[in-house]
Image: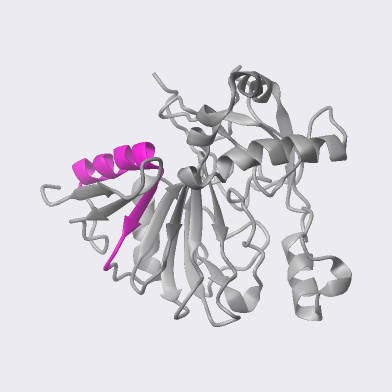
Amino acid sequence: MSDLKITKVTANIGARVSGADLSRPLDDATVTALRDALNEHKTLLFDDVHLDDAGQQAFVRHFGAITGAHPTVPAVEGAPGVLPVDSGRGRAANNWHTDVTFVLNPPQATSLRSITIPPYGGETLIANSAAAYRDLPEPLRRLADTLWAEHTNDYDYAVPEEAIDEDEAARRAQFTSVKYRTVHPVVRVHPLTGERGLFIGGFAQRIVGLSKSESRKVLDLLQAYVTRPENVVRWRWEPNQLVLFDNRITQHYAIDNYDGLPRRLHRVTVAGDVPAGVDGKESYAIEGDASHYTSVAKVPAAA
């Protein structure tokens, strides 16, 4: 704990962490310091990390029970909690999203570890959705506080079906092999900090009570505040790095700017709680049971 150093990388999001050996069990004081830093900075960036899949899962377990790799996508062989984020398996992540928001209790935190890095490009953008909420003009904040959105894994793709090849069609079919639809508050209250953040992103397809076209206009308006450059950290991957971000109050985007070169990260996520809005009401599922994928985390309410 005495060697732990946390250094901000932007005003609104991100901090580099040094002085913690992630390959060893962490003491309670270090875990508490990292959790506090995650609450404050939303994204923690670790260099010189020498972990295998088992080591990454062991580190992530300091923050809670880990989920399965994904509700519908296969895990790394022999590591059921590890999802390969591999350019050879498609580039569906090159849109702004929060992980797995189509289930009732999305992961509370996500870790990504660099495996294969292209010589250029392939950065990950991570945005602070609490800063985005604070940026909203007061009339928009009041509106957003009242809205609920339906999230689904059967989301609108940027590339139409007729323009994709057989491999990509198969990946899409697998991703949607079980349909999930869940309604979440557009403004989620963080259970540890009490902060309000815009809980939308690519899986949010429709505002409850609005038509699809009306929903798109409202969601696009709110999303523009999330992705303001001031609210985003752009992470250029290098070998032996790990990023941990708070999935309850961030969005991220994998940039497809590396000419199809190999790129692979391994993802491990922490089981999350059921989101609640500003009125205390919780999200509710419409379709799909994700209990095989994740337990429901029990977290204390903000003081």
Residue at image location 58% in from the left, 28% down from the top? 136
Q: Horizontal placement of 174 versus 235: left or right?
A: right
Q: Quadrant of the C terminus?
A: top left
Q: Is residue 25 visible?
A: yes
Q: Quadrant of residue 185?
A: top right
Question: What is the x, y in percent for residue 272?
Answer: 51, 41
Residue at image location 21% in from the left, 60% down from the top? 21
Question: What is the x, y in percent for residue 223?
Answer: 64, 41
Residue at image location 58% in from the left, 44% down from the top? 106
Give yes or no for residue 44 being in the magenta stretch: yes
Residue situated furthest left in the rendering:
2
Question: What is the x, y in percent for residue 186?
Answer: 65, 31
Q: Horizontal placement of 80 versus 149: left or right?
A: left
**Residue nearest the observer in this picture, 95 or 177:** 95
**Residue nearest the observer in this picture, 82 or 129:** 129
* Mark count: 0
Q: Which residues are magenta?
A: 27-48
